[in-house]
Image (spheres, rainbow, N blue to C red):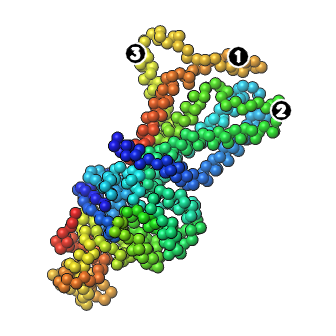
Amino acid sequence: MVEINDLSFGYARKENLYEQFSIHFKSGQIYGLLGQNGSGKSTLMKIIAGLIYPDSGNCVVNGINSKERNYNYLRNLYIIPEEFDLPDMTIASYVRIYAPFYEAFSADQFETCLKEFEISPEEKLQKLSYGNKKKVLLSFGLATNVRVLLLDEPTNGLDIPSKKTLRKLIAAAATPERCFIISTHQVHDLENLLDHLVVISKNKLLLNESISTIAQKICFVPFSSRPAENETLYYEKSFTGHIGIVPNNSNEEGKINLEVLFNGIVAQQAKFSQLFKPNK
Amino acid sequence: MKSIISQIQSFNFHRVISLILEYYHRNKKTLFISSIALFLFLFCTLLLFKRYGEIGRQNDILQYSLQIGCIYLISSILAVHYFSTLWMKPGNISALSLPCNAIERLLSAVIVTMIAFPVAYSLISLASYFSTLPFFRSHDLRFFNLDPIGMGWISIIGTFIGTPVLFLWGGLFFKRSPWIKTILASIVYSAVCVAITVAIFYFLDPNWDAFSEWEAFNEFFIPKGSEYVNGKMATIYHSPFYFLSSISLMTCMVIATYYLLKEKEVK
């Protein structure tokens, strides 16, 4: 569905963000794209959306090279950026003008999403708060029914009930033909939603595994006191003492603490890369 | 070339219409304000011309130049900003990811800036002219002359159709102050063209013998006191050279604008 091969890219007068970077995103999956600030998550999203062209290598979406960026490339792709600008019009007018560009757009689905977010279609976009504008954009993106939906920090600006609604709507919109790539810092917001986790750090693919595989290989154990170094792959302080990541020897899939996992992967790259040999 | 063929294959005129509607809805306030401003400005200045100007051909030419100049100014400013959303963060992400081909995007811009703007603003200009008529006695009324200086329709149409492409290109090529930079670029381009032409002519015929009979000027009536006297005006606008250079420049600009659209990024 999305194939990035030997990608090299860097902004002018800056160190290359990606060098010979490869990753494949498959259909029917909800990917969580995690990384520290400046790790290149948003850049990767823009490259996939065809908004930035690779210096070398390629990005192919649904069999079309991103450098083509023609109608056939863009028709099955929708990006919801972290920062956006909406025109001065009502939500209903916005849909009337922009929906014709997306063949599979569902007005009913859009209305359902808006209703879930408790927003009226008659409201003016410019009068909405940042969070509500984002809800409109998220509803529109989900209703386009494109095959590749890119969401850059989708939960930023959303209140707690709306984050729950968003999780529900994404889960409902996911089909075997669609691929969702969600970039976020707020890993808690996406727990129980993701099928696959991708952790990147400047030009490195630190982790590229399904949630199921991760849960089979590691588990999260609470410690009342600080554990010994060789006892865990990684540990950190928690409210009740310490929480550590240890190899899962039981073969039973436990719950994944995404925040601790992310911290562990970033802090103990060698240990985790040995455990999870990155798949291309 | 392969890319252009694939874009032509998936070309859809409905999307061009959708792009035009998208432009209109996004900019309707600007378009409305510019229309009102043009109408009021022309209405007031035409009243002043009629009230204080001399009745005659010179006055006609001044009125004409004012009207054409205003239409040209507004059209060129709007044309240079047609693709401004592609520059502006963060709106450029949504603008550039809108599903359409670069050819469709270009065609929508060409239709709006080459046809819609000149037609709409010419109608507003005419409306402002006719709105001034009730303020004057019947013997002051003379029918609005669309071509009082005798440029010729081909030249008028050529100017109004050819220049928007130049400004569309400028709007995509120059990030800051695109309007001024486009005008400067066109002056430089014209100067280079003239220099090259003169150099070629000089190389072919150092004594200019072949061109001595060349009718470089045509007759033109200039008012002097109460009479008209013969004047001369450069016929460059009528010359095939002007026509060909306009067409070639326009074609180059269309191709350049297409590639700028296709290669545009949101870095």
Residue under label 1: B229
Residue at position x 50%, y 60% in the image = A99
Residue under label 3: B203
Residue under label 2: B138
Kindly indicate whether the residues beneath marks 2 and 3 are on one polypeptide chain: yes
Measured in 3D between alpha carbons, the distance from the residue under mark 2 to the one under mark 3, in whole angstroms, is 58 Å
Q: For this rendering, which residue is in front, B177 or A33?
A: A33
Q: For this rendering, which residue is in front, B137 or B228?
A: B137
Relative image position of residue A274 (x, y in whole percent): 16, 71
Q: Quadrant of the N terminus of chain B?
A: top left
Q: Tag 3, which secondary structure?
A: helix
Residue at position x 53%, y 57% in the image = A97
Measured in 3D between alpha carbons, the distance from the residue under mark 1 to the one under mark 2, in whole angstroms, is 27 Å
Indicate the amino acid at tag 3. Answer: Phe
Q: Earlier in the sequence, mark 1 or mark 3?
A: 3
Chain identifier of the residue bearing label 3 in the image: B
A260 shown above or below B220:
below
Indicate the amino acid at tag 1. Answer: Val
Do the residues under discs 1 and 3 have CB atoms within 8 angstroms?
A: no
Relative image position of residue A158 (x, y in whole percent): 46, 73
Do the residues under discs 2 and 3 have CB atoms within 8 angstroms?
A: no
Residue A18 visible at all: no
Q: For this rendering, which residue is in front, B1 or A279?
A: B1
Number of disc labels: 3
